[in-house]
Amino acid sequence: MYRFLLTPRWLALHLVVLLVIPAFVFLGRWQYGRFEERSANSTRVTANIEAAPVPLEKLAAPAQRVREDDRYRQVTVSGTYDPAHALLVRRRPQNGLNGFYVLTPLVTGNGTAVIVNRGWVQAGATADATPEVPAPPTGKVSVTGRLRLSETEDSSGIRERSGLPPGQVLLINADKIGQGLPYQLVGGYVELTEQSPKPATAPAPVPQPDVGAGGGLNLAYAIQWWLFIGVALVGWVLLIRREVAERKTGEDSKESVAAAN
């Protein structure tokens, strides 16, 4: 009755099932790994945002990269803004509008400074038009903000290009921006959330990062792939049972015809 399982057509079906099951296992494990990775990142970023601010020098230093685990930590730093070396970061949409981030070095003394992203301004009428940018406060300023890693092409997905208008960049990269400056820059930057004294006008604040659901969608995909394993096995069994039933019905019909004759 079951010798049909060794026919070429059924052997091909067995092979497909045997290949599909480990593929679904792999895809489910990959999605689950992404779930664990994103959940850990969400937990870490949320904890950093909610932690009490600490002095910048405890987490960052000139010419040293900010640690991954310190992303979005709240930091405090004091100094004097250097508007002469301010920059605009192109292609930074916010609230559905195209615009720029406003970068201004904050000189902290002893020949060191940190880039402060003071916020966002809307783009002008054309891509090359310089937008109106509120001036930074003068004199000594105390800044609180989120510590960020320097951007690279790989981390941001943004590709560098030449020929930009003067005073504009595409990436917030402390190493590149610091070339030619009269002080050393911390190897990262601060995304401003508060400052004292407060200026009369200021760029729009950069929104707090959306940590999302912590990879919940990846977990759903992982479960989905593993459910497909059951679907494949049940389908394989049902096909075999249907074939057996059809063959049995056929044999019963032959026996009935033979008996009638």
Image (cartoon, helix red, strand yellow):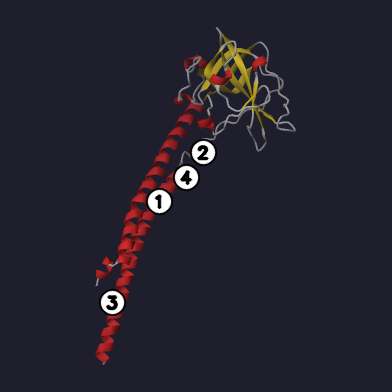
- Measured in 3D between alpha carbons, the distance from the residue under mark 4 to the one under mark 2, in whole angstroms, is 10 Å
Query: In the rendering, at what x and y percent does residue 132 appear?
Result: 73, 25
Nearer to us of marks 3 and 2 is 3
- Residue 2 is at least partly visible in this image: no
Residue under numbered circle 1 = 225
Q: Which residue is mark 2?
A: 212
Instruction: For mark 1, give the secondary structure.
Output: helix
Instruction: Categorize mark 3 by other alpha carbons within 10 Å: few (<14), some (14-19), many (20+).
Output: few
Say which amino acid is labelled 1: Trp
Earlier-in-chain disc, 2 versus 1:
2
Q: CA distance from mark 4 to mark 3?
A: 46 Å
Closer to the camera: disc 4 or disc 1? 1
For the residue carrying disc 2, how many other residues have a C-alpha within 10 Å: few (<14), some (14-19), or many (20+)?
Answer: few
- Outermost right residue: 125
Q: Position of residue 115 (x, y in %)?
A: 58, 19
Cα–Cα gap, marks 3 and 2: 56 Å
The CA span between labels 3 and 1 is 35 Å
Mark 4 is surrounded, within 10 Å at the Cα level, by few (under 14), some (14 to 19) or many (20 or more) other residues, namely: some
Are the two marked residues, 4 and 2, in contact with CB atoms closer than 8 angstroms? no
Residue at image point 25% right, 85% down: 255
Question: Residue farthest to the top?
Answer: 110
